[in-house]
Image (cartoon, rainbow, N blue to C red):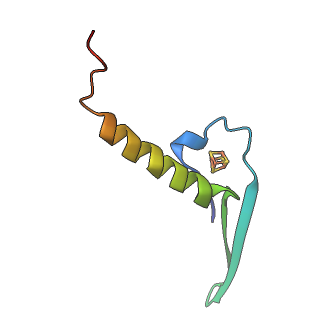
């Protein structure tokens, strides 16, 4: 099986760097390969995305200054 593990916010990202994790299992039916392709920067971007979500939650309900 080959699986692509990227987030919605990764679509069209020019910084995508493929990080390939391949595991081989041997079972009664022979060798089975499991390959997952993710982005090398996924951990950092996940944390940044969480920070933006928290900031966005704090801004909910804020209608801006009234003059
Ligand atoms: S993990 Fe970050 S750098 Fe990688 S494709 Fe997604 S947004 Fe771009």
On screen, 67 above or below 36?
A: above
Where is residue 8 shown, x and y percent of the image? 52, 42
- Quadrant for residue 41, please give it: bottom right
Q: In this view, does 24 lie to the left or right of 45?
A: right
Q: In the image, residue 16 lies at what x, y percent?
A: 72, 47
Location of the N terminus by quadrant is bottom right
Query: From where the camera sits, is residue 5 visible?
Result: no
Residue 63's spot in the image, x, y percent? Answer: 27, 21
Whether residue 56 is visible here, answered yes or no, is: yes
| Left or right for 27, reference 51 | right
> Based on the displayed image, in which of its 4 quarters is residue 9 positioned?
top right
**Front residue (pair 33, 7):** 7
Residue at 54% across, 50% down: 48
Which residue is located at x 61 percent, y 38 percent?
A: 11
Q: Residue at the spot x=76%, y=52% of the render? A: 17
Q: Where is residue 6 in the image (x, y as percent from the top left)?
A: 58, 51
């Amino acid at each position: 099986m080959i699986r692509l593990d990227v987030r919605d916010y990764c679509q069209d990202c020019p910084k995508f760097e493929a990080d390939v994790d391949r595991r081989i299992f041997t079972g009664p039916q022979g060798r089975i390969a499991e390959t997952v392709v993710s982005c090398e920067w996924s951990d950092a971007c996940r944390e940044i995305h969480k920070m933006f979500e928290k900031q966005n939650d704090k801004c909910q309900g804020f209608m801006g200054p009234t003059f």
